[in-house]
Image: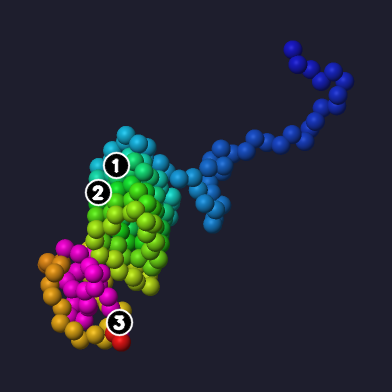
C-alpha cells in the first residue's frame, strides 16, 4: 500500500524514545502540578515533598509540599508546610512556609510562620503571624518557635490560652501588638 517509489531507504531512522525516560525529570526542572480538582475530597495526609500541588477541591488533613496553591474553590482543613503557599480559597489550620501569599479571596483561620508574607486587600486572616529567617527549620507546625532576638522585659498577658498556637506557650519576652507577637528591641 505504501512504498518508497524510487526514493532511497533511510537507514538512519532514530529509535523511538524510551517512555520511562521521558517521564523522568531533569534535575532542577519544574514538573507538572498535581491537581486536586473541584468536587474531589481527600481525607488524610498529603506528602508532596518538593512537588507543586494545586488544590481546587477539599483536603481534610495535613499537607506538605514544595509549592502549594489553594484555588478559589479549594479548602484545606489541616496544617500546611511548604516552600511557598498561595491561598485564593480557604485554609483552616497553621501555615509554615518561606513564602506565603494571601490573595484577595483568601480566608485563613490559623497561624502563619513565614519568611515572606504578602496579603492582598480583601483577604481575611484570623490568627497570629510570625517571621522566622528559616521557618522550615522547625520540626513541625506544633513546635514552639522560640524568639530569635528578644530584649523587651514588658510583662505579657496570657491571651492565647495554653499552647494552642504554632508558637507554643508565649514567653514573657514577647509583646502583643494588635494580635501579633512582636520580638526584638523596643525603642
- Asked whether the viewer can see residue 140, the reply is no
Residue 107 colored in magenta in the image: no
Q: Nearer the viewer, residue 137 or 182?
A: 182
The residue stretch that appears in magenta? 164-185
Identify the residue under disc 2.
77
> What label does residue 58 carry, if any?
1
Residue most extreme to the right? 6
Rendered-image quadrant of the C terminus: bottom left
Mark 3 vs mark 2: which is more N-terminal?
2
Circle 1: element type: strand
Please name the predominant secondary structure of the magenta segment in the image.
loop
Q: CA distance from mark 3 to mark 1?
A: 38 Å
Circle 3: element type: loop
Rendered-image quadrant of the N terminus: top right
x and y percentages locating residue 11 in the rendered image = 79, 32
x and y percentages locating residue 74 in the rendered image = 33, 43
Mark 1: give few (<14), some (14-19) or many (20+) Cα within 10 Å: many
Residue at 43 percent across and 51 percent down: it is 51
> What label does residue 184 carry, if any?
3
Amino acid at each position: 500500500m505504501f512504498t518508497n517509489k524510487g526514493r532511497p531507504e533511510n537507514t538512519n531512522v532514530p529509535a523511538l524514545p524510551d517512555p520511562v525516560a521521558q517521564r523522568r525529570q531533569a534535575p532542577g526542572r519544574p514538573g507538572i502540578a498535581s491537581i486536586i480538582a473541584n468536587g474531589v475530597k481527600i481525607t488524610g495526609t498529603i506528602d508532596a515533598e518538593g512537588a507543586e500541588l494545586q488544590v481546587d477541591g477539599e483536603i481534610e488533613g495535613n499537607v506538605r509540599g514544595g509549592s502549594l496553591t489553594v484555588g478559589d474553590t479549594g479548602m484545606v482543613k489541616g496544617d500546611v508546610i511548604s516552600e511557598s503557599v498561595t491561598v485564593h480559597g480557604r485554609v483552616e489550620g497553621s501555615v509554615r512556609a518561606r513564602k506565603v501569599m494571601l490573595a484577595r479571596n483568601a480566608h485563613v483561620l490559623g497561624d502563619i510562620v513565614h519568611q515572606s508574607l504578602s496579603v492582598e486587600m480583601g483577604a481575611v486572616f484570623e490568627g497570629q503571624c510570625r517571621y522566622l529567617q528559616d521557618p522550615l527549620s522547625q520540626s513541625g507546625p506544633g513546635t514552639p518557635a522560640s524568639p530569635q532576638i528578644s530584649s523587651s522585659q514588658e510583662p505579657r498577658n496570657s491571651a492565647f490560652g495554653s499552647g494552642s498556637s504554632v508558637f507554643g506557650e508565649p514567653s514573657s519576652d514577647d509583646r502583643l501588638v494588635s494580635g501579633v507577637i512582636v520580638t526584638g528591641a523596643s525603642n
